[in-house]
Image (spheres, coloured by chain):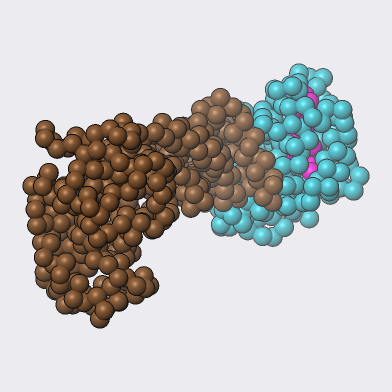
Chain colours: A cyan, B brown
Amino acid sequence: MIILQATDISKVYPSGESSVTALNHLSIGFEAGKITAIVGPSGSGKSTLLNLLAGFDRPSSGSVSHQGIDITGMPETNLASYRLAHFGFIFQNYNLVSILNAQENVELPLSLASVPKAKRNSISSEILKRVGLGKRTTHYPNQLSGGEQQRVAIARALATNPSVLFADEPTGNLDTTTGTGILELLTEPMEGSQNRTLILITHDMEVAARANQIVRIRDGKLEA
Amino acid sequence: MNFADLSNLALRGLMRRPVRTFLTILGIVVAVASMVVFLSLGEGFRRALGDQIGNIGPDIQIQLAGSDSSSVFGSPIPDVPVENVARFETLKTELGIRQVIPYLLTARGNFSGSGYVILAYPFENTKLTDVYPNMKLSAGRWVLPTEANEKVAVVGAQAAKTAKLGLGDELRLSRTDRYKVVGLLEKGEGFTDSAIFLPFQSLSKTLAVQGKATGIALKLNDASDARAVANDLNKRFEGELKAQTQGDVVQVLDRAIAIGDAFRFGISLIALIVGGLAVANTVMMGVYERTKEFGVIRAIGAKPSFVFQLVVWESLLMALLGGVGGIFVGWLGTLAVNFAVRDLISVEIAQITFRLAGLAIGVATVLGLLSGLLPARTASRLVITQALGRN
Ligand SMILES: Nc1ncnc2c1ncn2[C@@H]1O[C@H](COP(=O)(O)OP(=O)(O)O)[C@@H](O)[C@H]1O
Ligand SMILES: [Mg+2]
């Protein structure tokens, strides 16, 4: 079953007098519960694609639909709620909120979704334990190593139990050993959330090998 | 997100740069405090007016139709012909007038400084206690009916201090005219404390205004008739004389105070605007610094309106803290003002009322909202992919 579908999407960035075509009439579908690795040279449009799929930005043309619902034309307010309810994100540079500690970072999407405090606490404690940070809950991002920060970021992305998880080069800033740990965390099947779809950008072919599907991008197009 | 979480997030945002936040709040404190002190003066005057209205004078005052009664604290030129007294005497029974008292009023020095007011009454047929029933002597005696032409004086407690007069001393009004102090008054409430009372005829000669009075005071049998009697008199003497009740006088004074308030508020508005700009600047810098974090929050699923609220709330928090601090510092300021002028005026001229405190909080709220609008707009409209930067 296709859970996420991009249909004929293009993204053109204005760049001074001219413009850059980051994505060029690209169509792709993602199977529910599967891991997809997106690979391609730097500047080929991988991040642009992920941003469009995740609803961070809108395509110049074409559309993206999730579970049959077109998210391309949604007003920003609805789209934000949609992201909160259905999507999770992991960034290369972790992007934790520096004024919040580990537990508060994990609880941020939950409090945005108005989950009551007690429930929030139990969810965040449990997930932080699962990512191996049960003893680091009150540490602030600047007190955590890169690998630990990325674990918090994963916990934050998983807190709302999203149906699709996006990760843009999640191990790009980490050494190989740490990166492997993070990938295991991302790709291991988790109890009670088997149907998670993971779409992940990577440069690492070993990482890509773990995926059910590998998508190659070059110059804003799919490579056959 | 509930309000507690939002507040927590806003506070954390502010505490990221504690010194900058503190300095900004201090700016608001100073602005609000200056407004509070400025406006507290008006409140003090207003309250003093309420307290002392019984002492300002008689039930009805008669003046020339064209003259300005707002110069109560100035030195109006005596322009009411004394012959008019007879006209009111004839109306006594018809209108329920108990007493008709011409008076002279002249001020020395300025009211806020070392000044006092000289009031002259015809003591041949009037006692000071007729006009001011609560007045009491602390030393000496009253002016006798036989002294209507003598140069004698009864001095209010505050006036005695400012003019440095004791019993038996002489008050010099001109090169030749010296008035001997025969009585000192007990400290009372307000205006009469700063007055010196002389015989009407003597002062007429000293000032060379024989036949003229500053005004004519009417005491009524029933003070509650004042409004109706004044209306009646105004009809009878239209275009020639005007009759004012105490209420009229208070109204004029109140208007004068309101004008003063507006003026002082205008001055403090400058401080408030500067404080508001400081808040706007601080919040805006906070927004720029945290562009990426706002991008992350939006990416996770916060609505633009949430980011807007968050930033406005940060701004409002600073302004409200500044407002509360400003009221406190302003209160200290009014204590200082009242202490500084305690020897000059017998009333506490600076007063912080609930009304004023409410105004200060209201102004701080408006300030916080206005200052937060632009930064909040900026923060809520940022483009997520740009805010996150390029991976
Ligand atoms: N916000 C932007 N403004 C202008 N050009 C952009 C922007 N984002 C990406 N690009 C351009 O689009 C192309 C694809 O970028 P990106 O999707 O980040 O590639 P990748 O993630 O594969 O390295 C690049 O040429 C890049 O310079
Ligand atoms: Mg990229």
Residue at the right extreme, as displayed: A191
Q: Quadrant of residue B138?
A: top left
Inspect this view and state whether residue B344 appears: yes
Front residue (pair B80, B157): B157
Front residue (pair B269, B184): B184
Residue at the front extreme, as displayed: B146
Measured from the top left, where is residue A119 in percent x and y?
84, 48
Inspect this view and state whether residue B71 appears: no
At 55% from the left edge and 29% from the top edge, which residue is drawn?
B22
Stretch of the chain drawn in magenta: A147-159
Going by the image, does B350 lie left or right of B19? left
Front residue (pair B339, A69): B339
Measured from the top left, where is residue B97 in percent x and y?
28, 73
Going by the image, does B164 lie left or right of A130? left
At 70% from the left edge and 33% from the top edge, which residue is drawn?
A100
Q: Is residue A182 above or below residue A157?
A: above
Q: Quadrant of residue B384?
A: top right
Front residue (pair A202, B254): B254
At 86% from the left edge and 47% from the top edge, which residue is drawn?
A193
Measured from the top left, where is residue B164 in percent x and y?
31, 31
Question: Is residue A151 found inside the magenta-colored segment of the image?
Answer: yes
Secondary structure, magenta segment, majority class: helix
Question: Is residue B377 found inside the magenta-colored segment of the image?
Answer: no
Task: Identify the image quadrant of the C terminus of chain B.
Answer: top right
Measured from the top left, where is residue A13 in percent x and y?
47, 39
Q: What is the total number of numbered labels drawn onto the structure image? A: 0
Residue at the bottom extreme, as displayed: B94
At 16% from the left edge and 66% from the top edge, which residue is drawn?
B85
Q: Is residue B367 above or below residue A154?
A: below
